[in-house]
Amino acid sequence: MEEIKITEISHNLIRLRQYEEDLKGLTKLEPRLHEEVRESIRLEVESGKLDEIKGSGGWVKGRAKSPSRNIGISGGFRFMGLLPGEWVKNGEKPLKTLWHKSFSL
């Protein structure tokens, strides 16, 4: 678990096993991928532009860029996470999975 600060409020970011496995494989494409995911989460929460997956019980999808390859968020990576609400206590945000746009789940 690690801390992420969003609008002066600290939250716990929980990296689930699937996310860790996906991250390990994809850091070959983008060495700073986790940092890009963290920044994307911060920006999306601050802007209020969260893309909830309908019928998922609070899971949201997000996008992260790949600056080392000069690729923006539209061609970069996708991730899923659960944001605070009734399902998550103490501001914890589990990250479930991570994938590159050209891959499918």
Image (cartoon, helix red, strand yellow):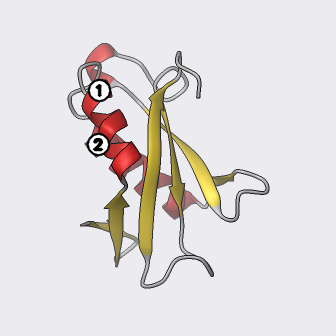
Q: Residues within 10 Å of mark 1 (few under 14, many from 20)?
A: few
- Let me know if residue 49 appears in the view: no
**Which secondary structure, mark 2?**
helix
Q: Residue at left 43%, top 78%?
A: 91
Furthest residue in direction bottom, as rendered: 90
Q: Residues within 10 Å of mark 2 (few under 14, many from 20)?
A: some
Furthest residue in direction right, as rendered: 55
Label drawn at residue 34: 2
Q: Residue at left 71%, top 57%?
A: 56
Instruction: Name the foreground residue: 5 vs 97.
Output: 97
Q: 10 above or below 43?
A: below
Q: Nearer the viewer, mark 1 or mark 2?
A: 1
Q: Which residue is mark 1?
A: 25
Q: Whole-percent x and y of residue 34? A: 29, 42
- Separation (CA) of disc 1 from disc 2: 12 Å
Q: Residue at left 37%, top 55%?
A: 16
Residue type at mark 2: give it. His
